[in-house]
Image (spheres, helix red, strand yellow):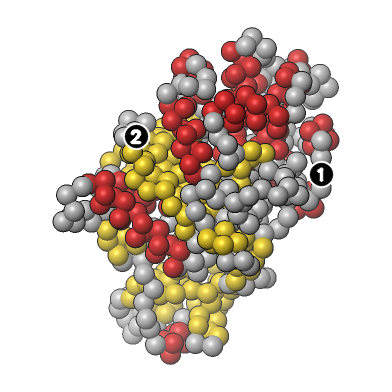
Amino acid sequence: MLKVKNYRLKGFKFITLIFTICFFVFSNRVFAFDSVNKDPQKNISIKIDEYMNEQVKQGRFSGSVLVAQKGKILISKGYGTANYELNVPNTPKTIFRIGSITKQFTALAILQLQEQGKIKVEDTINKYIPDYPQGDKITIHQLLTHTSGIFNYTQMLDFKIKCRLHYSPEELVATFKDKSSNFEPGKKFLYNNSGYILLGYIIEKISGKSYEDYINENIFKKAGLSNSGYDHSEKVIPNRAMGYGVASSAIVNCDFIDTSFPYAAGSLYSTVEDLYKWDKMLLNAKIISKSSWDKMTHSYVNVGDMGTNTSYGYGLFVGDTQIGDVKKNTISHGGNVNGFAAYNCMYTSDDVQIIILSNLEFASPMDLNNDLSKIIFNQKLDVPKAMIVDPKIYDNYTGEYKIESIGESISIVKENNSIFANFGGTDKCEIYQTYESNDKSIYLCKFLPYKLIFCKDSNGKVIKIDIILGGESYSGNKVK
């Protein structure tokens, strides 16, 4: 998942990472399925719409959502704003960058070429890029499955500078080809954008076309995806959303990235409606053969940090996902690139598709997908709502908390009857209370996916903080 910014704690700096997984735990408001409406799918649509409107209200989402079940679209709707400066709303036809969802298109292109006898996934890459270091040991299969061990170019220290420049595919490959490998090819899984850059370059060499032209002619046109393409910042593309980030608790225009940089790993755009067409064509083997689709969705390598039942195929995550009390088979992938976040999920056994595209880079579509899945599969879902409180209580929370595990501190400050968490630098965000009891209070960050649990002593005095982000927890005592 190509991502330039990631709001994961590490020394409380927002650092560049490639792949993020956040399972944010919501609390306080419960969605149930005891509505008087006799149409179960209508009930689901209502609950989804209610849930998404709450996310927009809390500043956690702007984008479009499509949910389908058994061939029927339950909801296809835009939420929030496509352009904040012009106050243009999102719609189901709004175009978003999809980040690493691009990878499944790249993988499918490779399988198309294999069906034509022009490449084999068992081939070593020196057959197509003769001068690539260890090219006689690295296979196409390993690039597809993130098991090549090559250096991941999104880990370069000057990444934020390089991503603003324009590159030819050959120039882009040159930025990482001579970097030291992480491990010997085939030894393990490590999510790697460089592998998909090489795959795009190889597609060009084999087809004689640019990656953009190949994808347009052999996938988008054939699949009827008229609102999908390779993004270019300088082009005027009707219905394209602007991308946004956050700074000092305010929405800001996202950092620029030249789309030649994410290339075949993350430069495509689409809509929720186009991606739904795409999902159906994949599931029905309309764009590639059933044999190739089986190869694309085979569990080749376990993905350790996503759970023991999740594996990687070709451009897709496959496996079982726990949804409340039930386990469901999924095929999915997310995407993050400056200003945008996306998630495309197919529950194959239940014929359910969930597509979430956002023009807020701090949005967490995977978390939203998990919550929408609970609605669909009739599982308990708790959704937090901001409580109205007397600002005087904030004095009990303000101060400095020392996080010993990472040697950093977080400050809680009160400003103009509002309360903020300061993670250092410009990483200050407004927080709001969603739960209160004698021994603890729970606050959420506006915009960012942090959950703050303030622990109290027997007298109600705050003495400790627990910070939750995804499956990670950071604890710190109040020192000032």
Is 323 placed above or below 30 here? above
295 or 306, nearer to the observer = 295
The crowd level at tag 2 (other Cα within 10 Å; few <14, some 14-19, many 20+) is few
Of the residues tagged 1 and 2, which is closer to the observer? 2
Give the labeled residue for mark 2. 71
448 or 283, nearer to the observer = 283
Which amino acid does the dot numbered 1 rest on? His
Q: Percent from the top left, x then y, of residue 359?
A: 57, 55
Number of numbered discs on residues: 2
Q: Quadrant of the N terminus?
A: top right
Q: Percent from the top left, x then y, of residue 76?
A: 42, 48
- Write the residue at 65% across / 29% down: 215
Q: Percent from the top left, x then y, of residue 468?
A: 46, 61
Q: Residue furthest top?
A: 117
In the structure shown, which secondary structural element does the residue marked by tag 1 occupy?
loop
Is 97 placed above or below 274 here? below
In the visual, does 221 lie left or right of 469?
Answer: right
Quadrant housing residue 456: bottom left
Q: Percent from the top left, x then y, of residue 393?
A: 41, 86
Q: Residue furthest bottom?
A: 392
- Write the residue at 22% across / 46% down: 40
Give the labeled residue for mark 1. 166
Which amino acid does the dot numbered 2 rest on? Gly
Q: Quadrant of the C terminus?
A: bottom right
In the visual, does 365 lie left or right of 162?
Answer: left
On the question of residue 41 being in view, the answer is yes
In the structure shown, which secondary structural element does the residue marked by tag 2 occupy?
loop
In the visual, does 35 lie left or right of 470?
Answer: left
